[in-house]
Amino acid sequence: MIVIPEVFARTTVEREGEPGAAWLAELPAIVDGLLDRWGCVPDGEVMHGGVGVIVPVRRPVEGPAVLKVSFPHPGNVHEPDAFVAWGGRGAVLLYERDDDRFAMLLERARTSTLEDVQDGDEVVTVAGRLNRRLAVPAPPGLPRLREQADAWEEQLGKDAAELTHALSSRVVDAAVATVRELGRTQPDTLIHGDLHARNILRADREPWLAVDPKGYAGDPAYDGGTLLKTRALALLAVDDLGKAVHRTLDVFAEAAELDRERTRRWAQFHAVQTAFWGRRHGFRIARSGPWLDRLTEFADHLAGVLTEGS
């Protein structure tokens, strides 16, 4: 049986409570059953992401792969559907799936990610090109981001009214305007939904392959915002945030062949959401204390910079 990484077990229980603990107790047996069913043997140390374990495996004929088993959650339902639609175009291949167990047998990529690349322009260019390749017609049944627009607008209003914050009304109003003007009319295009450097792996079949998609149908420019907000730690150190942010937008929009202004507006919306989220819930890397305060202040600043020119 596999050994579940201690950090993964702890964070799962902290996040999911008793259901998480119960799932963890069953997980080794689930993995063993899937290994037998799909004719695989373990082939390396068990790894993990935020919500699932990744077991490197080898199949007698087909060769290396990975078995991914995620905690059952609505946000993970459509991941295999996205992989099927892409068919290996810019993303890892899906070999097998067990939707009841939230499990997939996937093409094995390398363990290094785009986040390991030091050149910021290269990071953004690679992500932008992948964004373009992943933007294909969405199959029926995927969640449409436009259906979230009412909830987005309601939450922005609630956060602005209930939370103590430093965001100006102009900044908040710009995010609301994006929801009203772009959020309700998004195309039926498959997008990653959580595109950032840690979800892009070095590979052999192609130089870079995407993993961990949400499988949404929506505006490809939406993922420009998910990328930018996850570049926050790299941007914290720059002398001129405005220059760095607008450079990032320029490079991403060109590589993704997207409208630059549309990309900026989605990025601004994400930044405002993030600033409010940090106040309510903290961040993955900072739940309290001075570091949380610094990140929240930075999110405010980023939202303001992205509002400029609107």
Image (spheres, rainbow, N blue to C red):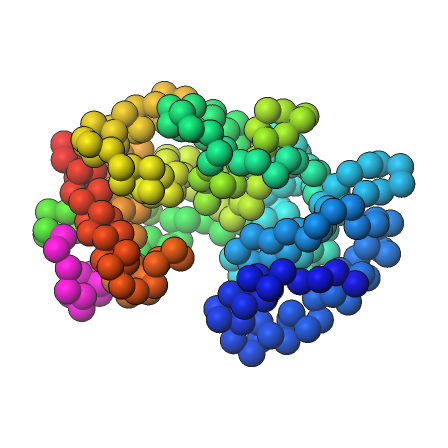
Pick the front one: 40 or 168? 40
Pick the front one: 43 or 25? 43
For residue 205, which quarter of the picture? top right
Depicted 213 relative to depicted 135: above or below: below
Residue 27: give x, y in percent of width and height: 70, 66
Q: Does the magenta stretch include residue 30?
A: no
**Magenta stretch, main secondary structure class:** helix
Residue lying farthest left?
Answer: 169
The residue drawn where x is 27% and y is 40% is 236
Depicted 34 relative to depicted 25: above or below: above
Pick the front one: 187 or 71? 71
The residue drawn where x is 79% and y is 63% is 1
Residue lying farthest right?
Answer: 60
On screen, residue 259 versus residue 46, left or right, reads left
Depicted 193 relative to depicted 17: above or below: above
Q: Is residue 259 visible?
A: no
Residue 260: give x, y in percent of width and height: 29, 27
Q: Does the magenta stretch include residue 160?
A: yes
Range of residues picked out in magenta: 153-167
